Image: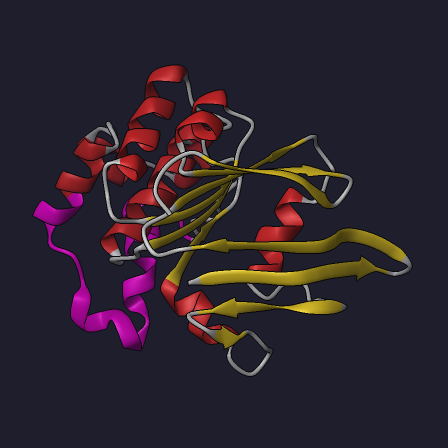
Amino acid sequence: MITFRNVSVLSGSKTIIDNISFTVSHGEKVSIGGASGSGKSTILLTLMGAYKPSRGAVFFNDQEITANNISLVRHAVAYIGQEPVLGSDTVREGLLLPFTFKSNRNSLPTDKQIDTILQRLKLPPDILNRKIALISGGEKQRLAIARALLSNKQIFVVDEITSALDEASNNIVLELFLQSDFTVLAVSHHRQWLEQFDKGIHIVDGKITEIQQRGKI
């Protein structure tokens, strides 16, 4: 499904990631760990088209990703960063923002579907009426996940999305991903994510130093 094949990315004369190769199969959960500044986030952003490989290639569903077809990835993948941007004034507007686009108008979720997703993520129903500027970072992270679920995304590329969550909320998000057919590529410092995912990739100074296979392929 996702393949990095000998990918390197340069910023000026500096190599950010160097000769990165790995695969993420359908339904597989893969974690990327390493010190801050080691290149973990750059891997995710390269998949999403924010960086162009200086060497090597990235493939999605057996197609090499280029500027001409990056929309295939962006349409299919839910990318969620550490500080999600919900892009509206109120939480309800933020959750429904993707459905204001012409391509999504026929899949507008019902109030029941919204309530069900909020319950899964242990978010109170009245959060819908709150101002996004007044909710916590952890709530924003869970709302970004809720929006992706309402959009029926099956592939999640996430960067420290539980960094602002307490232990209980982290476990809720982790279990949601583990007990599903979602495909997940996640940067995380959290021990549980690194230990419970199917595959763990360790990055040092932009290079893969270890890939641990723990579960299914």
Q: Residue at x 38, y 31 (%)?
A: 139
Q: Residue at x 14, y 40 (%)?
A: 115
**Res 136 seen here:** no
Magenta segment includes 202: no
Magenta stretch? 88-114
**Image quadrant where residue 179 sits:** top left
**Image quadrant where residue 78 sits:** bottom left
Q: Residue at x 82, y 58 (%)?
A: 11
Looking at the picture, the colour scheme in use is: secondary structure
* Residue at the outermost bottom position: 68
Image position of 201 (left or right of 78)? right
Residue 102, x across and y down, in percent:
29, 77
Asked if 155 appears above or below 171 in the picture, the reply is below
Question: How many tags in the picture?
Answer: 0
**Image quadrant where residue 124 sits:** top left
Frontmost residue, 118 versus 93: 118
* Residue at the outermost top position: 167
Frontmost residue, 49 versus 110: 49
Name the quadrant of the N terminus.
Answer: bottom left
Residue 159, x across and y down, in percent:
53, 41
Q: Residue at x 30, y 36 (%)?
A: 178
* Residue at the outermost right position: 13
Asked if 104 appears above or below 168 in the picture, the reply is below
Magenta segment includes 110: yes
**Res 41 seen here:** yes
Residue 93, x across and y down, in percent:
31, 52
Majority SS type along the magenta span: helix
Residue 62, x across and y down, in percent:
45, 73
